[in-house]
Image: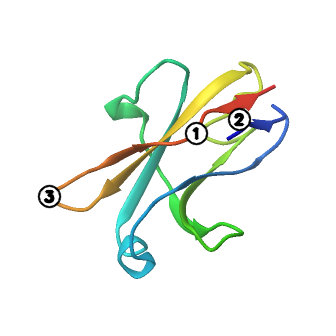
């Protein structure tokens, strides 16, 4: 799969596909973090995210990235990796998404 690219000036949703029944997933809390490769998530870096659906009907976790958001990469282009954390108490699975290039 090719790396997705986003202009650093763009403000749009970044999504990560999540497998599972949509009616169950969308009832769970979800957070995301977008880290400069090869950094890993930190406890303080998680931000509230939302649920959505991609053009193929796949359930996705999504968060707004770009200028004026919690994930503003306009001054630091590079390759980033999105991470999703789902509150499925007592479990908190973390899913690593496809890298994205901010240029």
Tags 1 and 3 in contact by the CB under 8 Å rule?
no
Residue highlighted by disc 2 = 3
Closer to the camera in the image, 65 or 58: 58
Name the quadrant of the N terminus: top right
Residue 29, horizontal then vertical, whole percent: 36, 63
Q: Quadrant of residue 78?
A: top right
Q: Residue at x 58, y 56 (%)?
A: 62
Residue 31, horizontal then vertical, whole percent: 43, 51
- Badge 3 marks a residue whose secondary structure is loop
Residue farthest bottom in this picture: 23
Q: Residue at x 42, y 41 (%)?
A: 46
Residue highlighted by disc 3 = 90
Q: Residue at x 43, y 34 (%)?
A: 45
Tell us which disc is closer to us: 1 or 3. Answer: 1
Mark closer to the chain start, 1 or 2 = 2
Q: Residues within 10 Å of mark 2 (few under 14, many from 20)?
A: few
Tell me the CA gap for discs 2 and 3.
33 Å
Q: Does residue 20 sit above or below 39 in this rendering?
A: below
Q: Residues within 10 Å of mark 1 (few under 14, many from 20)?
A: some
Mark closer to the chain start, 1 or 3 = 3
Q: Residue at x 75, y 29 (%)?
A: 102
Residue farthest left in this picture: 90
Residue 6, horizontal then vertical, whole percent: 79, 37
Closer to the camera in the image, 73 or 55: 55
Residue highlighted by disc 1 = 98
Q: Exactly how many numbered labels are in the figure?
A: 3
Tags 1 and 2 in contact by the CB under 8 Å rule?
yes
Tell me the CA gap for discs 1 and 3.
26 Å
Q: Does residue 68 sit above or below 28 in this rendering?
A: above
């Amino acid at each position: 799969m090719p790396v997705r690219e986003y202009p650093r000036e763009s403000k749009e949703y970044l999504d990560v596909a999540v497998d599972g029944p949509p009616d169950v997933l969308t009832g769970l809390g979800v957070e995301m973090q977008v880290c400069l490769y090869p950094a890993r998530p930190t406890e303080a870096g998680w931000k509230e995210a939302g649920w959505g659906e991609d053009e193929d009907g796949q359930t996705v976790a999504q968060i707004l990235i770009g200028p004026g958001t919690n994930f503003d990469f306009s001054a630091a282009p590079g390759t980033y990796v999105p991470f999703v954390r789902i509150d499925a108490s007592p479990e908190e699975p973390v899913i690593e998404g496809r890298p994205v290039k901010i240029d």
